[in-house]
Image (tube, rainbow, N blue to C red):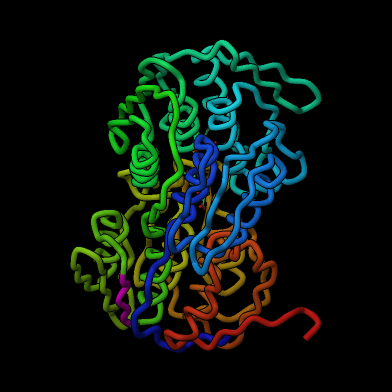
Amino acid sequence: MRGGERISGETVIGAAKNAVLPMMAAAILADTPSTFVHCPRIVDVESMRGILRCLGVESRWRDDSLVIDGSRIISGEMPEKLSKRVRSSIFLLGPILGRLRKAAVVYPGGCEIGLRPIDLHLNGLKRMGVEIREAGGVLHCDGSRMHAADIHLDYPSVGATENVMMAAVLTPGRTTISNAAREPEIENLQAYINAMGGSVQGAGSATVVIDGVSKVRGVSFSPMFDRIAAGTYLCAAAITGGEITLRGAEPRHLTAVTQKLREMGCRIEETPDSVSLRAPARLRAFDTLQTQPHPGFPTDMQSQMMALASVARGSSVIVENVFENRFALAGDLNCMGANIRVAGRAALVQGVERLNGIHARARDLRGGAALVLAALAAEGETVISDVHLIDRGYAKMEDTLSRLGADIRRVSLTD
Ligand code: EPZ
């Protein structure tokens, strides 16, 4: 790709990866099919389909909808290779226990951004009476004596909140989760479960209440828009002095990001289902950005904001409070001419006039997306490899950006 082109135009934002993945897991609570409308064709969805297939759960695309049929689930044994590749396989633990009362899952393991422990997931399920025995890296879970429980999460973990929610849907009695994560995707999961006939309340707040029901049935559901993809494309316009309109983006789920972009000098206009941004010729630095659980600034947008800060006028401080290793991008930006110093969970970004194109590789999903943003603003050509990591969460990012004016194309290494 070659930098220097202004991003200009409008694009429709598709359904959220982080809403669809837990819903694909929750679909197996029902013995009739669910259809997810406008489901994103991203790598993580295909990987999750592969894991479901190993459990006997078939799925198929119908235009841009994904149909998942949980009627023939035959096993709760998750395949080791796939489970390690797709961390969100851990979301299946709750629904499998909810449906079959027994499961075997491998530790999903860490990834580029952190160790990603699952202690909060397991402690929550143990509170519900699940007996968990670890042997050779496999967790054998016996849910035959599962019961409702009051669960307090030491940390508002998104995955742990969703896993316990799903485990409780078919468990008799009232389960409460306090200090629950409040991300909008959890509210969306509640809406899907209730549409199936479940009884969940309070998602989006710090206390979620689940009243067990005897069965749920599959439904057609339209998952919420991807607020991280939306924030990423706003940043593409911001870093190139351009303007963009996002259709299907609900402003109320983007406030932490749009607030920061206003701080950097961007003009933001909103309607109930669209957000428009017009960027200044050059961005101003923001003072400080701290990532926090929702409604704080989303950690999944931290790398993108680091790219913007690297060419802004002034110095910005970024503090990454959620994951322990999410500053890998800083090294690549410095190779492009940025001036970033990292000390533990803090990064000091002193904005420079200009970045230069380089050959780099994506190191993680959001860091890779942020590298593309930096390349949009850089002088000269940038070649980014390992873009399959970006494909995990963005459907054909290069097509979207190219339609918006970017000089970007995907080439195969043999080209
Ligand atoms: C979800 O991951 C998202 N993934 C992540 O998005 C997102 O960054 C994260 O929530 C925070 O918003 C999906 O929804 C599929 P957490 P999750 O449990 O559930 C620690 C992306 O780029 N923790 O809230 O794994 C953990 O180590 C991805 O789309 C424990 O200590 O996030 C981390 O430091 C990246 N023990 C913090 O909590 C546990 O049992 C937040 O993790 C679980 C988590």
Q: Nearer the viewer, residue 94 or 55?
A: 55
Query: Magenta stretch: residue 330 in it?
Result: no
Task: Report x, y in % for residue 94.
Answer: 54, 30
Q: Which residues are magenta?
A: 243-247
Quadrant that contains the N terminus: bottom right
In the picture provided, is 363 more to the left or to the right than 240? Answer: right
Query: Where 372 falls versus 36 (above or below)?
Result: below
Task: Report x, y in % for residue 64.
Answer: 49, 67
Tell me what residue is drawn at x 39 percent, y 39 percent.
Answer: 196
Tell me what residue is drawn at x 65 percent, y 53 percent.
Answer: 47
For the stretch drawn in magenta, what is the main secondary structure? strand
Q: Nearer the viewer, residue 28 or 316?
A: 28
Task: Report x, y in % for residue 224.
Answer: 36, 55
Q: Nearer the viewer, residue 138 or 370?
A: 138
Quadrant that contains the C terminus: bottom right
Q: Is residue 303 visible?
A: yes
In the picture provided, is 159 more to the left or to the right than 181? Answer: right
Residue 137: name its quadrant.
top right
Task: Report x, y in % for residue 378.
Answer: 52, 81
Tell me what residue is drawn at x 44 percent, y 63 percent.
Answer: 38
